[in-house]
Amino acid sequence: MTTISDFRATTLTGFDRPLSEYAGDVVLVVNTASKCGLTPQFEGLESLYTTLNAEGFEILGFPCNQFAKQEPGDATQIGDFCQRNYGVTFPMFDKVEVNGKGAHPLYQWMKKETSGWLRGGAIKWNFTKFLIARDGTVVKRYAPTVEPASLEADIRAELAKRA
């Protein structure tokens, strides 16, 4: 069975990171953009992260420029923007594609895992969210407009489970 631990990604600072580092954690994976109407969700994401991180919760941000070119910056610009405007402390990764032949393998897998669900298949916009259980499997996919605060109950339910 494939899990999030089977993937790797490059951080904004250029380091190759095995996602197995998050094994046993509850993880929220989000494709982000700095120039999107939904960009203020960074504030809610950071709030969730600071509230729940000590309990084994992680957020992994993946900037993407595939939607109306709303993430045009390079890694340094993206990191500076997220820190300066929203105080982001959760892990941010290098810019990826989430759709098409060039889609990051993690996104290929998450989309496949949720393809039969409502709003499954292709990522429709920035700030699509995937909740990953402690065992590394996809629990749920959330539409871009779903506010981070509304995910807290689902995240806490997963945190209450032991891998």
Image: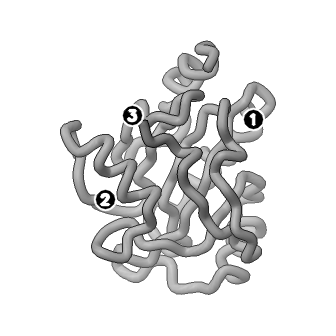
Sequence-wise, the earlier of marks 1 and 3 is 1
Give amino acid for label 3. Answer: Lys
Give amino acid for label 2. Answer: Ile
Image point (54%, 69%), residue name: 63
Image point (63%, 51%), residue name: 19
Characterize the local packing of mark 1: few (<14), some (14-19) or many (20 or more) Cα atoms within 10 angstroms. Answer: some
Image point (55%, 55%), residue name: 7
Asked which quadrant contains residue 163, the reply is top right
Characterize the local packing of mark 2: few (<14), some (14-19) or many (20 or more) Cα atoms within 10 angstroms. Answer: many
Sequence-wise, the earlier of marks 3 and 2 is 2
Give the farthest residue toward the front. 1
> Between marks 1 and 3, how big is the CA–CA gap?
19 Å
Q: Nearer the viewer, residue 2 or 70?
A: 2
Image point (34%, 62%), residue name: 125
Q: Which residue is mark 2?
A: 123
> Between marks 3 and 2, how big is the CA–CA gap?
14 Å
Q: Nearer the viewer, residue 9 or 61?
A: 9
Q: Is residue 16 above or below residue 163?
A: below
x and y, in percent, of residue 83 in the image = 76, 66
x and y, in percent, of residue 87 in the image = 77, 58
Characterize the local packing of mark 3: few (<14), some (14-19) or many (20 or more) Cα atoms within 10 angstroms. Answer: some
**In the visual, does 157 lie left or right of 43?**
left
